Amino acid sequence: MSPRGRPRAFDRDAALDTAMRVFWEYGYEATSVSDLTAAMGIGSPSLYAAFGGKEALFREAVEHYVRHYGWQAVNELDREPAVWRAVEAMLLANVGLYTDPALPRGCMIVDAATNCAPGNDAVREFLAGQRRATRERIAARLRRAVTEGELPADVDLDALVGFCETVRNGLSNLARDGRSADELRSIVDIAMNAWPDRRDRSRER
């Protein structure tokens, strides 16, 4: 009798990336365990053994999204010396992410659990916590701009951070509705025209 061949190794990272894309596309509640196992090419016992269940898998998938996709745009805040350029670069990077044809449209953190049954409040709060982390990154960059004299000392930082959040979230929603990258870039351009303490930026570009 010939020896049995070894079972194929389970690629956990590839399975996690696949699960992330399913949750990103359809949202937490609309995604079933059978949807996940079919996409990942594993049985439900393997899913539970490797990830602990649907909610645990979702949380890990969100963290995977943040590491590999979400923070890439937010990190633009630290790459540009001028604060308005930093915010513009972040928003344009978001446009690129939200409309990338190789990925689901929009932002997973914004769209994956906007409406949840009461039993899934923990999932909704988990995503809210992720959004608060992004808000704090934006707020820290704007506080630095105030300290360095780039923004007026009396600027309403809470409102300005909220403005950045509103534009980011709106871009995600419009991307989900099928708006093109060019359309979204035009919106970013208009949004940046509302930036406080504007100067003649044509000479800065």
Image (cartoon, rainbow, N blue to C red):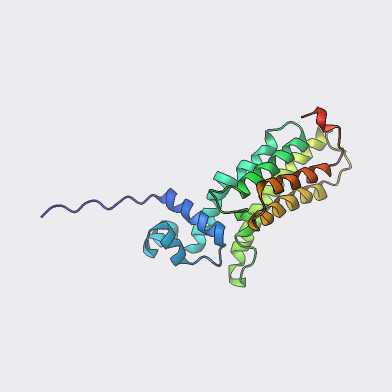
Q: Looking at this view, name the residue that lies furthest to the bottom.
A: 118
Instruction: Measuring from the top left, give residue 28's x and y in whole percent.
Output: 56, 63
Image height of 39 relative to 182, above or below: below
Count of number-bearing discs: 0
Q: Looking at this view, name the residue that lies furthest to the right.
A: 154
Instruction: Measuring from the top left, give residue 91's x and y in whole percent.
Output: 70, 44
What residue appears at the point 60 percent right and 64 percent down from the top-left corner?
122
Image height of 47 relative to 88, above or below: below
Along the line of sight, the residue nearer the viewer: 189 or 4: 189
119 left or right of 171 in image: left
Instruction: Measuring from the top left, give residue 26's x and y in whole percent.
Output: 55, 62
Along the line of sight, the residue nearer the viewer: 56 or 85: 85
Image height of 116 relative to 144, above or below: below
105 left or right of 174 in image: left
What residue appears at the point 65 percent right and 63 percent down from the top-left corner?
114
Quadrant of the frame with the N terminus: bottom left
What residue appears at the point 70 percent right and 52 percent down from the top-left corner?
171
Quadrant of the frame with the C terminus: top right
